[in-house]
Image (spheres, grey):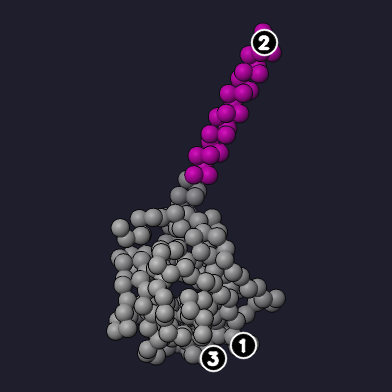
Amino acid sequence: MFEKQSNDQWGIIKKIGVMIAVLIGTICVTIWLVVVSLPIASVLPLQKFSIDNSLVLGNLGLKQEFSFSLWVFAVENNSDWSAILDYRHSATKSFAFHQKEGENNLFAFGVHAANGVHGTYVHLTPNRWQHVALVKSRSRLAIYVDGIKASEKSFDGGFDVAYAGDEMLTINGWGYGGRRWLGSVSCVRVFDYPLPHFFIKLLARDRGCIPH
């Protein structure tokens, strides 16, 4: 009888311990999501673009690690190098997310560093909304589509983006003019650190960003 009561008590203690651990974990994740994961810039409303319009957010102070989260509605027949995102890149500095020359809806996440140009590529499906996350860490570039890693490029020893100090984030177009993209974006968020995969999955489930 005493042994049965002891086992029952121990079982209750273990259940309470598990509940406390889950509660602490939930609190920690919530704090991380609310405080640590706050974007440094965001554009939440739907933005529809044409050959005549773009959106400039200015210099965001981005350094060597950053991420973008956005919903993208791609269309057919964009021009070469039409840019969804551009941080006033040139042949020797900064970065962009733009269509590759001669490849309709094949987009390059390209970074210009002191040791050359580095990039990774992804195909976007036209005429449907897709969540896209771009991640730059010290040693890799990665693109996620709908919460799944679509492409990645790693670098031994790492690499640094070359900046000139005049960078400004442009949505739909090159920072120096032209190269307009004809699709739509929604819920653009910019982070000054590499987003972990689990958080990218959460962002990709946020269907409230998709216009109805």
Vertical comparison of 154 with 22: above or below: below
The amino acid marked with disc number 1 is Gly
Can residue 55 be seen here? no
What's the distance in space between the residues labelled 3 and 1, CA to CA?
8 Å
Q: Which residue is mark 3?
A: 92
Alpha-carbon neighbours of circle 3 within 10 Å: few (<14), some, or many (≥20)? some
Instruction: Give the x, y percent position of residue 29.
Output: 49, 50
What's the distance in space between the residues labelled 3 and 2, CA to CA?
77 Å
Which of the two residues, 148 or 22, is positioned nearer the viewer here? 148
The residues colored magenta run 1-26
Q: Which residue is mark 2?
A: 2
Dot 3 or dot 2: first in sequence order is 2
The amino acid marked with disc number 3 is Thr
Alpha-carbon neighbours of circle 2 within 10 Å: few (<14), some, or many (≥20)? few
Vertical comparison of 199 with 123: above or below: above
Instruction: Give the x, y percent position of residue 10.
Output: 63, 23
Q: Which residue is mark 1?
A: 116
Dot 1 or dot 2: first in sequence order is 2
Asked whether the residues under the numbered discs 1 and 2 touch, taking CB atoms below 8 Å apart as contact, a structural biologist would say no
Instruction: Give the x, y percent position of residue 20.
Output: 53, 36
Secondary structure of the residue carrying numbered label 3: loop
Q: Dividing the picture into quarters, in which one does residue 53 lie?
A: bottom left
